[in-house]
Amino acid sequence: DAKTTQPPSMDCAEGRAANLPCNHSTISGNEYVYWYRQIHSQGPQYIIHGLKNNETNEMASLIITEDRKSSTLILPHATLRDTAVYYCIVRVATTGANSKLTFGKGITLSVRP
Amino acid sequence: NAGVTQTPKFQVLKTGQSMTLQCAQDMNHEYMSWYRQDPGMGLRLIHYSVGAGITDQGEVPNGYNVSRSTTEDFPLRLLSAAPSQTSVYFCASSRGPRTVNYGYTFGSGTRLTVV
């Protein structure tokens, strides 16, 4: 699976958009980009994923660059409850047994009042 | 639906003791896995299973055993607990591996301390 690079931390004001970047310059054509978050002391929570098109759901939007070497997770109106560690994961799309997730250290998002 | 249920939530063991961490899911997911998380680190995969009767090792399997006799349950056994196994353990499940367009559902974790 391709490696991802995220800054260690960022903050944003409550009510504003939070844009979390991720670099995955070695991503291959059949690898998806996934985002998870982990609120303190809880299990990770799936947010969104995409292959090459931009995606949106009730939690967030995912913007993937045309060359697919980087992506941005957007929380459109951050709240204090969005304070968490956010993990960007690139996972091979396989029909075989290798479907594990490889978590890095993620980016800590702090939402301030 | 309960999702992924882990028990116990907290456990203290003495060095050398054995125990089983339980994980159950009610979503009919094929794929189940165990991760550990240590302070300041990301999650590391211990073992995983792509279906009943099939298990495989992750990146940190030493000291742990698993079995998958049913689709719903995936217990993690510590054979002889060591202080290095003090960690938070998470179980996760997914419809995968043949269906990549789904996320993983995680349990709330088991906090294990080995003294």
Image (cartoon, rainbow, N blue to C red):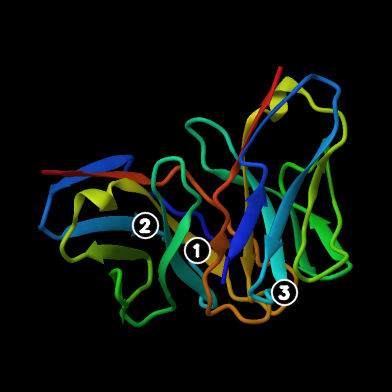
Quarter the N terminus of chain A occupies: bottom right
- Name the residue: 69% across, 77% down: B28
Amino acid identity at mark 1:
Val
For disc 2, the marked residue is A23
For disc 1, the marked residue is A90
The numbered mark, 1 or 2, whose residue comes first in the sequence reads: 2
Instruction: In the rendered structure, find residue B30 and report the number of the disc placed on it.
Output: 3
- Name the residue: 15% across, 48% down: A12
How far is disc 1 from disc 3 in space, using C-alphas?
21 Å
Labels 1 and 3 touching (C-beta < 8 A): no
Q: Residues within 10 Å of mark 2 (few under 14, many from 20)?
A: some
Amino acid identity at mark 2:
Asn
Image x and y of residue A77, in percent: 15, 62
For residue B92, which quarter of the picture?
bottom right
Closest to the observer, A80 or A12: A80
How far is disc 3 from disc 2 in space, using C-alphas?
31 Å
Element class at badge 1: strand
